[in-house]
Amino acid sequence: MSLNTPVLNRKNAPQIVDAVNYNLQLKPYEKWVLKNGVEVYCVNAGAEDVMSLEWVFFAGNSWEKQNLIAASTNFLLKNGTSKRSAFQINEHFDYYGSYLNRSCYNETSSISLHTLTRYAGELLPVVRELITDSQMLQEELDIYRQNMKQRLKVNLQKSDFVASRLIDVYLFGEEHAYGKYSRNEDFDALQREQLLDFYKEYYQNGQFIIFAAGKLPSNLEQMLNEQFGDLPMSKKTLIPQVAKPATEKHFRVTNDPNGVQGSIRMARPFPNRHHPDFTKTQVLNAVFGGFFGSRLMLNIREDKGYTYGIHSYLINHVQTSAWMIATEAGRDVSEATIEEVKKEMKLLREEKVDDEELLLVKII
């Protein structure tokens, strides 16, 4: 501490500033376009010598012709190239204190890198290697298949896992990309050639966007152009899928007869963020179940003690979307919990939100 640093008087409480009086200004982003047309969005901010990069590919499960192809291809990206084994790839990123991950979603998949800024030059060529030279090795696929089937077996004993995947089926239909879920036979059906075909079309010759944030190196644009600006780009156009929600509206499923916990999911189809009333709906959702002091939390957690936490949220899908309520409660109070949720819905429909509560959620 500097000798000139003023000493705080801990006996005096700090001045309270109303949240509405804060003037928060986000730093504007920069946009670059690489030589091959790849768009790069950057936020150069932060005091520490760290940064993150994310490559977002149009390669989610909406593009696959068979269940689990997209997710399996994405997972195996870092499990071996013609130059490095899976162990060597992981060892390389570990050596530089970085973290590389990959994820697969409905429309997109991604590779994300978190690293010290000064090591970007050592790591970007290996990320390029994953995009251009992953081998989808048979032995790695066999290990992946075995591990995922074991994980599925364990997860099917968990009520929250079963509830979350079934509500998607009921909302969108099992044939829709948003309603798909994994089975043992789906893992058994995976073939290396299918993964290689998907990899070639959607990674080696795919379409992607790059996002960068943190304390960025001054020559980042040059490095990205060197490593990724010459990759072939093929614009992808996704054909929208039609949701086929279940005609039955109430389901009771028992996955573990001896379980003491119930998982509750209540949802309905809802427009996505492009709807003109989406911002208003976000405010309404905050009142209902969108934060710790919401009506659902105050009633069902604080007053009734039925659950540790209950939340409502708008699912962020590109195509058709949904409004969801999710909680875990004791099996003996699950039905009572559902009834209390319905009461709060009725109250929200029939009585105006008062000014004080509305101001609170607007600040949040």
Image (cartoon, grey):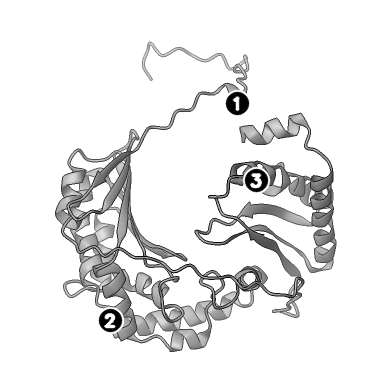
- With 90 as the anchor, is 1 left or right in this view? right
Q: Secondary structure at mark 1?
A: helix
Q: Which mark is residue 19?
A: 1
Q: Earlier in the sequence, mark 1 or mark 3?
A: 1
Report x, y in % for residue 351.
83, 41
Depth order, front residue of 32/6: 32
Q: CA distance from mark 2 to mark 1?
A: 54 Å
Which residue is at a point 63% across and 53% down the rendered structure image?
313
Which residue is at a point 29% across and 79% down the rendered structure image?
197
- With 228 as the anchor, is 186 left or right in this view? right
Q: Earlier in the sequence, mark 2 or mark 1?
A: 1
Report x, y in % for residue 105.
45, 64
Q: Secondary structure at mark 3?
A: helix
Marks 2/3 in contact by CB < 8 Å: the verdict is: no
Q: CA distance from mark 1 to mark 3?
A: 21 Å
Which residue is at a point 28% across and 81% down the rendered structure image?
137
The residue identified by callout 2 is 137
The residue identified by callout 3 is 281
Give the number of marks.
Answer: 3
Mark 3: few/some/many CA within 10 Å (<14, 14-19, 20+): some
Q: Quadrant of the C terminus?
A: top right
- With 151 as the anchor, is 252 left or right in this view? right
Q: Name the kind of residue labelled 2 in the image.
A: Leu
